[in-house]
């Protein structure tokens, strides 16, 4: 039936309104992208990096062990546990700091921490000649769990030791590094995935699977390849990252896998030689993770532009996401200009939040608490509130890596606000 004149006018107005809203949305998005301003002054960033690295270095005792956990509230009891993966990650963060500003005392502290890790946790895998693992031991971890070699321990152990080897050649025997890499490859399945754990009694086990271990393992293999260009190391890393990309392809939602982003950025920044790398697949996977990060984070407002990436104000989820976003800039092509700009704005905001949360004065200067604030005192928030003032070495580690990554990727490209 033909439309009456008034109906045509109504529909025309409706279409014009819809088109206006669409254009307005695009313009608002473009304005938001153009309006992204630097929030972090370089001098403030330098102080934050110095304070954070100073805190971590001072936490390493004469034997090379970190003071793993404290609480800024002295009335709260701290659990006496340890985690060698976070020990290794902290060495990695300190190496990133040293690379930008060499400091003999910092190097000595890292060497002590590396010696401790090798003496206490680096050991052969029973019955598997030439393979070395970083063992999570019950007497060190104080968790009551049996001795086990975690894939992430080998990955981050390799990352830490290679990082230090680049700064101070001869710190670790190359054959020891290769032994750890062989263990990682022995944990990889034909499809590119991994077993997450190896038990001293029982061998490989995949009843539990870690989200982050594959990316950590891939990063360790890539970094070893950079100083020991054996194609086997790179093939293992590529196989791992392409497996993650392949199995997540097409999903509406993917895990926020910051270590996969970091490993992907490192991979695409090197010459792979004869090793085939599906760059488009790696980039598509990175875009999926980045979009997940950007979609899920709370929206900054004009009144409060400096907020956590998660609603409860925790610091480390923000730091790890910033690390991943920084790495993604080495993966996502310049053709994705709008996405890259959104990433840069998010990084700026994330770093500003972390610096807001960092302890600025006192004996714990440079520490990073678990959360920026306590939540309302409801019973179900009791554990969160008890731990809000907790400081663990990995909270500081990830913030440091986020700061250094921000400096490398963004801060040098745009003048900071006064």
Image: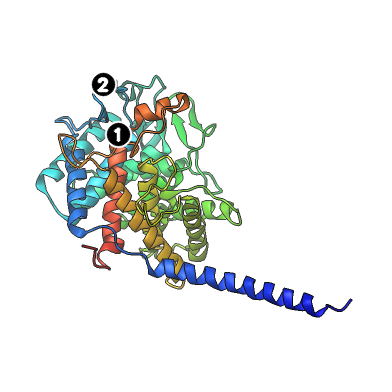
**Residue furthest right in the image:** 1
Q: Secondary structure at mark 1?
A: strand
Categorize mark 2 by other alpha carbons within 10 Å: few (<14), some (14-19), many (20+).
few
Q: Nearer the viewer, residue 260 or 321?
A: 321
Determine if residue 232 is in view: yes
Marks 2 and 1 sit apart, C-alpha to C-alpha, by 17 Å
- How are the colours assigned in the image? rainbow
Exactly how many numbered labels are in the figure? 2
Q: Nearer the viewer, residue 39 or 21?
A: 21
Q: Secondary structure at mark 2?
A: loop
Identify the residue shown where x is 39% and y is 25%. 147
Residue 139's x, y, as percent?
32, 21
Q: Which residue matches tag 2?
A: 75
Q: Which mark is residue 93?
A: none
Q: Upstream in the sequence, badge 2 or badge 1?
A: 2
Q: Where does the N terminus fall, quadrant-wise?
A: bottom right
Identify the residue shown where x is 19% and y is 54%. 44
Residue 153's x, y, as percent?
37, 37
In this view, the mark in front (2 or 1): 2
Q: Which residue matches tag 1?
A: 392
Identify the residue shown where x is 47% and y is 48%. 256
Decide if residue 24 is on the left or right side of residue 38.
right
Decide if residue 6 is on the left or right side of residue 108.
right
Identify the residue shown where x is 46% and y is 48%. 257
């Amino acid at each position: 039936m033909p439309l009456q004149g008034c109906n045509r006018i109504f529909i025309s107005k409706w279409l014009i309104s819809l088109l206006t809203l669409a254009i307005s949305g695009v313009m608002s998005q473009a304005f938001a992208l153009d309006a992204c301003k630097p929030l972090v002054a370089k001098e403030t960033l330098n102080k934050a990096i110095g304070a954070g690295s100073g805190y971590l270095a001072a936490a390493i005792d004469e034997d090379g062990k970190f003071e793993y956990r404290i609480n800024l509230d002295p009335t709260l009891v701290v659990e006496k546990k340890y985690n060698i993966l976070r020990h290794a990650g902290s060495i990695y963060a300190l190496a990133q700091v040293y690379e930008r500003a060499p400091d003999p005392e910092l190097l000595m502290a890292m060497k002590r921490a590396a010696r401790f890790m090798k003496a206490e946790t680096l050991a052969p895998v029973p019955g598997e000649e030439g393979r070395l693992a970083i063992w999570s031991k019950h007497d060190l971890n104080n968790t009551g769990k049996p001795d086990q070699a975690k894939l992430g321990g080998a990955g981050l152990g390799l990352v830490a030791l290679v990082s230090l080897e680049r700064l101070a050649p001869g710190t670790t025997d190359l054959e020891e590094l290769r032994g750890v890499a062989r263990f990682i490859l022995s944990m990889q399945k034909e499809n590119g995935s991994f077993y997450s754990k190896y038990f001293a009694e029982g061998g490989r086990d995949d009843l539990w699977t870690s989200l982050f271990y594959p990316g950590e393992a891939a990063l360790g293999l890539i970094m070893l390849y950079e100083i020991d260009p054996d194609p086997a190391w790179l093939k293992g890393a590529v196989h791992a990252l392409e497996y993650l990309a392949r199995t997540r392809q097409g999903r509406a939602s993917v895990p926020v896998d910051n270590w996969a982003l970091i490993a992907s950025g490192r991979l695409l920044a090197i010459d792979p030689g004869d090793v085939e790398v599906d760059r488009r697949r790696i980039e598509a996977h990175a875009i999926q993770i980045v979009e997940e990060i950007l979609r899920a984070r709370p929206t900054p407002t004009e009144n409060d532009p400096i907020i956590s990436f998660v609603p409860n104000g925790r610091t480390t989820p923000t730091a790890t996401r910033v690390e991943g976003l920084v790495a993604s800039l080495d993966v996502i092509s310049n053709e994705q200009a709008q996405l890259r700009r959104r990433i840069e704005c998010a990084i700026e905001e994330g770093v500003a939040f972390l610096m807001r949360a960092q302890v600025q004065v006192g004996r714990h200067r440079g520490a990073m608490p678990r959360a920026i604030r306590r939540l309302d005192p409801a019973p179900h928030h009791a554990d969160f509130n008890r731990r809000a003032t907790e400081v663990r070495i990995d909270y500081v580690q990830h913030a440091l890596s986020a700061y250094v990554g921000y400096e490398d990727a963004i801060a040098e490209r745009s003048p900071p606000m006064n």
